Image (cartoon, helix red, strand yellow):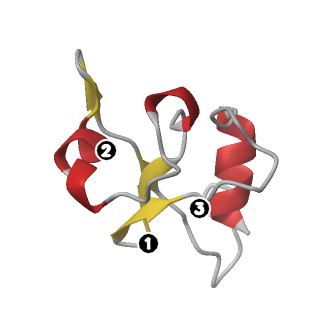
Amino acid sequence: GDGHGGHGAGAACALVGKCWDDDGDFLLIEGAESLPEWLQPSNSQNRCFIARGDVQLLLQSAEAEAGLGLAEALASLAG
């Protein structure tokens, strides 16, 4: 191996974080007054992450009424 876990020179590492506690998604609770009106508890699953040094809120598509699956959310963050 190259001593870099299989990654070549110049490869970037993406770190994504999510914060929650017993009450729910911590970032959504703390920022509730600043959130868009469409974001409700029923559709907020896997929409709020810490990525690229900032809080990222994944937008709702016109037909979406539920939260996102984790794989779908992570793919959206990667794109």
Question: Of marks 3 and 2, which one's residue comes earlier in the chain?
Answer: 3
Find residue 42 and report its horizontal and vertical position in percent. 54, 27
Say whether disc 2 or disc 1 marks the residue closer to the N-terminus: 2
The amino acid on which the numbered mark 1 sits, given as a three-letter code, is Arg
Residue 1 in view (yes/no): no
Tell me if label 3 and label 2 are in contact, CB under 8 Å. no
Considering the numbered disc 2 on the image, is that residue within a helix, a strand or a loop? helix
Foreground tag (3 vs 2)? 2
Name the foreground residue: 45 vs 35: 35
* Percent position of residue 18, x then y: 39, 42
* Callout 2 crowding tier (Cα within 10 Å): few <14, some 14–19, many ≥20: many
Residue placed farthest to the top in the image? 22
Picture residue at 25% right of the left edge, 48% below the top: 32
Q: CA distance from mark 3 to mark 2?
A: 40 Å
Q: Quadrant of the C terminus?
A: bottom right
Residue 30, can we see it? yes
Q: The residue tagged with tag 3: helix, strand or loop?
A: loop
In the rendered view, does 48 fall on the left or right side of 55? Answer: right
Q: Which residue is mark 2?
A: 28
The quadrant the N terminus occupies is: bottom right
Q: Amino acid at mark 3?
A: Gly
Residue beneath the point at 23% across and 15% down = 22
Q: CA distance from mark 3 to mark 1?
A: 25 Å
Query: As rendered, which of 16 and 32 lies closer to the eye?
Result: 32
Report which residue position mark 3 lands on.
3
> Which of labels 3 and 1 is toward the front?
1
